[in-house]
Amino acid sequence: MKTAIQYLLKGLAILLPLVVTIALAHWLLVTIETWLSPIWKALLGDKYYLPGLAFVSFLVLAAAVGFSSQWTALNKLWQLPGNIMERMPLLRSIYGTINDVFDLMSGKSFSDESVVLVHLPGGDIRLIGIVTKKSGIKGDRLSETLDDDHIAVFLPMSYNVGGYMIMVPRSAVTPLDMSAADAMQLTISGGLGKNRSNNKSGE
């Protein structure tokens, strides 16, 4: 009986990540198709519309927006809807949180030293953290509360149950050669994730 349960748990560990990933991908595909397919059907007609065209057009649109954002005027235009949401009391927290999570998972650097080891006092314990803010940024409330030699560090908790934002002196951290996305994956998985180094073996 114990062996059967072990096999079951091992099988679930293999299948569930795959099933959840496919389910999320399917949900995203269906959502985009539902929103954009009526536009294409109105332009081309049902006879010439091909399933998946809406999703492909969304990817092309995303690439075009990303490319055009290198120009200041267009970048401000694309940022306008988000700026409006950030001023709405109900949507501000939701949009801001989702936006920050995507920034983290996309590997965006929030400061010069994105990922650091935080040295806890009185021992050899180290915590992996992500630097989210440094001092000296005008108009930023968190940055303005930081002393000149302090930085804000986010310490994610394993299995995505939360985290802590701490303000520590720069002398209390050591920069790591790791992206924010890799640090999040490594920490949230409790160190069990299969994080692979960008360096090939033997180099």
Image: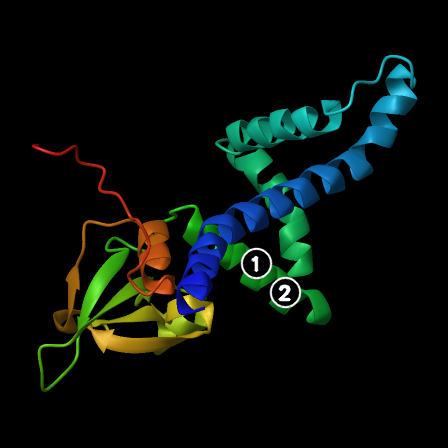
Q: Nearer the viewer, residue 43 or 1?
A: 1
Which quarter of the figure has residue 140?
Answer: bottom left
The kind of secondary structure element at disc 1 is: helix
Q: Nearer the viewer, residue 42 or 52?
A: 52
Which quarter of the figure has residue 10?
Answer: bottom left
Left or right position of 10 against 117: right
- Alpha-carbon span between mark 2 and mark 1: 6 Å
Q: Which residue is mark 2?
A: 94
Q: Of all residues shown, which one is farthest toward the top?
A: 48
Q: Residue at x 16, y 32 (%)?
A: 200
**Quarter of the image that includes the C terminus:** top left
Left or right position of 139 against 176: right
Left or right position of 15 against 138: right
Q: Mark 2, residues whose alpha carbon is within 10 Å: few (<14), some, or many (≥20)? A: few
Estimate the x, y position of residue 38 in percent, counting from the top left.
87, 30
2 and 1 marks in contact (CB < 8 Å): yes
The kind of secondary structure element at disc 2 is: helix
Could you tell me if residue 184 is visible in this image?
yes
The amino acid at mark 1 is Ile
User: Is residue 51 depicted above or below 16 in this figure?
Assistant: above
Estimate the x, y position of residue 193 in percent, counting from the top left.
33, 54
Disc assigned to residue 98: 1
Q: Of all residues shown, which one is farthest toward the bottom?
A: 122
Q: Residue at x 51, y 49 (%)?
A: 15
